[in-house]
Image (tube, grey):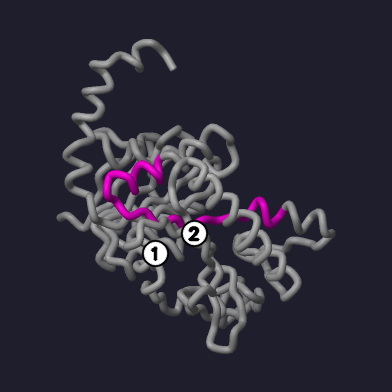
Amino acid sequence: MSSTSRDPQVVVEVLSEALPYIQQFSGKTVVVKYGGNAMTEDTLIDSFARNIVLMKEVGINPVVVHGGGPQIGSLLEKLNIESRFVNGMRVTDSQTMDVVEMVLGGLVNKSIVNLINQSGGKAIGLTGKDGAQIRARQLKVEHQSPEMTVPEIIDIGHVGEVESISTDLIEMLAARDFIPVIAPIGVDDKGNSYNINADLVAGKLAEALNAEKLMLLTNVAGLMNSEGEVLTGLSTAQVDALIADGTIYGGMLPKIRCALDAVKGGVNSAHIIDGRVPHAVLLEIFTNAGVGTLITDAS
């Protein structure tokens, strides 16, 4: 850290800028999807845990939803279990689902819980199966080639989508000053487990909790226009237009749709933020500039 950044006047200015945001968001819920570089680089891991603890200390209720795709892939490789993908989604048979549950619900989840606790917080790790919080159904994947008259339905196994979310357990934990850390595993009415996209779980959970904010950490600077410039404050109508004209496409599209659906579902704002930036969560919440793309329902 440079001497300039430790200057008392600079510290005072930073705290002064953060004060109105702290006052505005105290008592509110913020759902943070944690993944990407922020989850694999030591300095970013440490800053993320401290960010979450600080949010709790100033009266905000953070709820963390995490992914773990690279970690799942690594263990599958060690076990000599082949990874296959359809439309970017991992084909998940019963054997693969066992690995998913071990990695997401065990290794990754408890690692995040430990990091937050080591930073002074009180985190508790959960999966969507605990208390049957996340009811899931199997995701139906359609594939259609030009010569096909109707699309075929591809069975990719234990890959699910959110059917419903119960928030009682999460709200109870938050009220008792715990920080819920949730692995995106759901369960159906027959007890079958499903691996669900973490962005999707975070978005649906933010809606169910009537959250103030949904924050999706990514490995890019935010949503960019055709000139490579980051688009900051966008309305849902502007995002719809960017999807329609093809500015938003490819891998960013599902993440943007998730954020868009959350805002349309009642979340006050959604943020696509650059998880490669240290303290990205705090910078986005407590500074005027932010570090990503903000989406609101403002006209």
Marks 2 and 1: CB-CB under 8 Å?
yes
Which quarter of the figure is the N terminus placed in? top left
The answer to whether residue 144 is visible is no
Camera-side residue of 255 and 194: 194
Q: Residue furthest right?
A: 80
In the image, 94: left or right of 177?
Answer: right
Which quarter of the figure is the C terminus placed in? bottom left
Residue type pointed to by label 2? Ile
Residue drawn at point x = 40 percent, y = 44 percent: 53
Residue 277 is drawn in which quadrant?
Answer: top left
Residue drawn at point x = 72 percent, y = 75 percent: 94
Label 2 vs label 1: CA separation? Answer: 8 Å
Could you tell me residue 181's position as x and y percent?
Answer: 48, 58
SS class, disc 1: helix
Camera-side residue of 165 and 86: 165
Q: Which mark is residue 108?
A: none
Q: Which residues are magenta?
A: 51-73
Other residues around mark 2 within 10 Å, as few (<14) / some (14–19) / many (≥20): some
Could you tell me residue 173's position as x and y percent?
Answer: 39, 64
Q: Residue furthest top?
A: 3
**Residue under circle 1?**
173
Of labels 2 and 1, earlier in sequence is 2
Camera-side residue of 239 and 193: 193
Residue type pointed to by label 1? Leu
In the image, 256: left or right of 39?
Answer: left
